[in-house]
Image (tube, rainbow, N blue to C red):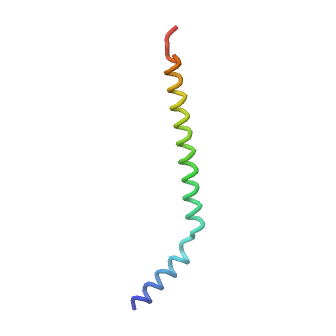
Amino acid sequence: MKNFSLITLILLFCTTLQSCEFIAGIFKAGVWSGVLIVVLVLALIIWLAAKIFGGGKDA
């Protein structure tokens, strides 16, 4: 009876879960989080360069 339940559960998952869509979702999330990290790092570098080279001084 346990084998029948396990096989039924596996078949149910195989027919209902679409692994290609799941993997595509993971890659999309990875791409967008990578883009966000790059933008944040560039903003930090520009802000630091402005502070170092006197971007905030009054004339």
Q: Could you tell me residue 55's position as x and y percent?
A: 53, 18
Residue at image location 54% in from the left, 72% down from the top: 17
Quadrant location of the N terminus in the rendered image: bottom left
Q: Could you tell me residue 45's position as x and y percent?
A: 53, 31
Taking the view exactly as shown, the residue that stands out farthest to the front is: 52
Taking the view exactly as shown, the residue that stands out farthest to the top is: 59
Left or right of 3 in this view: 19: right
**Rendered view: 29 above or below 14:** above
Residue at image location 50% in from the left, 76% down from the top: 13
Q: Quadrant of residue 39?
A: top right
Q: Could you tell me residue 50's position as x and y percent?
A: 53, 22
**Rendered view: 42 above or below 35:** above
Taking the view exactly as shown, the residue that stands out farthest to the left is: 2
Q: Could you tell me residue 16's position as x and y percent?
A: 54, 74
Number of labels in the image equals: 0
Residue at image location 59% in from the left, 65% down from the top: 21
